[in-house]
Image (spheres, rainbow, N blue to C red):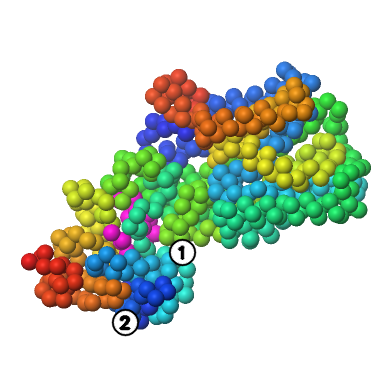
Amino acid sequence: MSELALSTRGLNKSFGSLVVAKDIGIALPRGVRYALIGPNGAGKTTLINLMTGMLRPDGGQIMLGGEDITALGPEQRVRRGLVRTFQINSLFPHLTPLEAVTLTICERERIARTWWRPTSNYRAAIDEAYDILKSLMLGESCYRQTRELPYGQQRLLEIALALATRPKVLLLDEPAAGVPREESAELFTAITSLSQDITVLFIEHDMELVFRLAARIIVMVSGGILLEGTPEEISADPRVREVYLGGAHG
Amino acid sequence: MTVTSPALTGPHQHFDAQIRWRTIEIVFWLATLLPFVVTPNYLSLASQIAVTALFALSLDLILGYAGIVSLGHAAFFGFGAYTAGLIAKWGWGEPLSGLVIAGLAAGLLGFVMSFVIARFRHLALIMITLGFGLLLLELANSASWLTGGADGLQGVRMWPLLGLFKFDLYGFVAYWYALIVLFVLFLVARRLTNSPFGLSLRGIRENSVRMRAIGAESRPHIRTIYTISAIMAGVAGAVLTQTTETVSLGVLDFQRSADILVILILGGTGRLYGGLIGAIIYMIARDWFSGVNPQYWYFPIGVLLIAVVLFLPNGILGGIAQLVDTERGRRWFGWLTSPPWRRP
């Protein structure tokens, strides 16, 4: 099973009587692009929260590579390569993007405890930060405070921060949420051009994008996994049409 | 000192610009020498301002940079003050080593306390630090055999500084001493805030949830900065003891914790100079108002505070920064906020 990047087994979680994750078992091979779809409230973000350690499961197991990470805290999972972005921007408003990405790299390289040397001495870290920002078309605006950036650029910065941790598995929670259709192209170009070594799981509501970007699709309904398969299989499945597509995809 | 965006050419320059000395900073530090010439009769007040500025600086490191609220920071100030006083009382009146020992003692207390501090945020922190400060005050009050209790610690005799300069009645040596200690620790703070560690602290202040999501553990950072801040506060307290040759319970008072918070907010948090400017304005205003009306001198201070919070929500420095960070502001004052010379 060593070629599995991320897998879960029998993952359960409920808040009181509300079951938000019901016996979730997924297996993501290395480098594959997955989409996670399902109607609102199906438990997609909850699943990401469980996998990244933001929520503790009531039962079940999460494996990253060959390692059981169920008991690890969020920051330890990130250090092992399991990284997420947020559906609602969760950034550092008063830092510039360049500072924020440099900060991430300093933490990754374990130089963030150094207090007697100026950040400007770490040329390599700054260069790497700038390269990541440039690759996401943020090279021009990385000197302004994050809160001043247009929304679409803030969404890109979400991904830049995740990339700066050198992820093995990247979980993108609605990366284009709130970005107008005509501006989301940049975002999805960025996602498509991610290194093939990175396993990507993204939540997205726009079916056209899902079918264009994902090699495989996981469908969730009310806390459980309904179905997993290729885009063709998913779009042909009558159950999916019924609960999710509602016949819209003809 | 202020946030302006100078013409940038690349990512390295973005960080280089943060560590370079600006003209206004050099002007500020030269101006701290003015009391020797202009107001030689007020050197005692000047040295008290320097002590308060150092105390405010220590609070800025945790509040302004890491976002840790404290309503009991006088605990470390007082602990340093009493340590310095007791060392001198017991027969070792050498100021510099006393200063180091007092700083380390306060730092040790801060280190122990930091394990509690790192687990909480916001309102819980206010209650914990407040309780801790009151606890220490009552301990000092009840242990009167050690601290002198409400009568204060008597018999503190300091030896001449470096064996050469005796602390005089006019506060001449005292101000030199306090000013140099302040400047040295300011340099440390300035270096610290421009380091990768300083960057991480700002990250914690801005969004601690996101820090975890980029693989950063906040707690070790918080423990480190809290300890450093406690050392600085302790040193500030020690300087007060050594320059006044007495310690009263007032060094641990809640009033002192509250005042220093007010001073920092008045000047502006997260800018290093905020606490310094706040200390100057607050202490001079207090001295002046209490001279005008010894009974109701807190009244105009209250008015001043309300005015600042209403019109300058980011403190005096925050307001100035906003003014300078405009087209016209940069044209008129840009030379002040840029380095005095260009690097070759």
**From the viewer's perspective, is residue A27 above or below residue B97?**
below
In the rendered image, is residue A33 in sight? no
Q: Mark 1 — residue?
A: A75
**Quarter of the image holding residue B168?**
top right
Which residue appears at 58% of the width and 58% of the height? B120
In the displayed orientation, state which residue is furthest to the top.
B38
Position in image of residue A190 (x %, y %):
24, 54
Quarter of image, res A55: bottom left
Location of residue B17 in the rendering, given as x and y in whole percent from the top left corner: 47, 35
- Write the start and end of the magenta stretch as one range: A156-174
- Asked whether B255 or A198 is in front, the reply is B255
What residue is rendered at 14% in x and 71% in y?
A: A241
Question: Image height check: is B193 above or below A90?
Answer: above
Q: Position of residue A193 (x, y in %)?
A: 23, 57
- Check if residue A161 falls in the magenta segment: yes
Q: Could you tell me how many numbered marks the image carries? A: 2
* Three-letter amino acid code at the position of disc 1: Glu
Q: Can residue A183 be seen from the camera position used here? A: yes
> What is the CA distance from the residue labelled 2 to the residue labelled 1?
25 Å
For image coordinates 55% across by 49% down, the residue present is B66
Looking at the picture, which amino acid does disc 2 mark? Met
SS type, badge 2: loop
Which comes before the other along the chain, label 2 or label 1? Answer: 2
Provide residue B309's location: percent of width, then percent of height.
55, 34
**Residue behind mark 2:** A1
Instruction: Judge the density around disc 1: few (<14), some (14-19), many (≥20) Cα neighbours within 10 Å.
Output: many
Q: Quadrant of residue B293?
A: top right
Q: Nearer the viewer, residue B297 or B337?
A: B297
Q: Is residue B21 magenta?
A: no
Left or right position of B233 against B334: right
Tell if the residue under mark 2 belongs to the same chain as the one under mark 1: yes
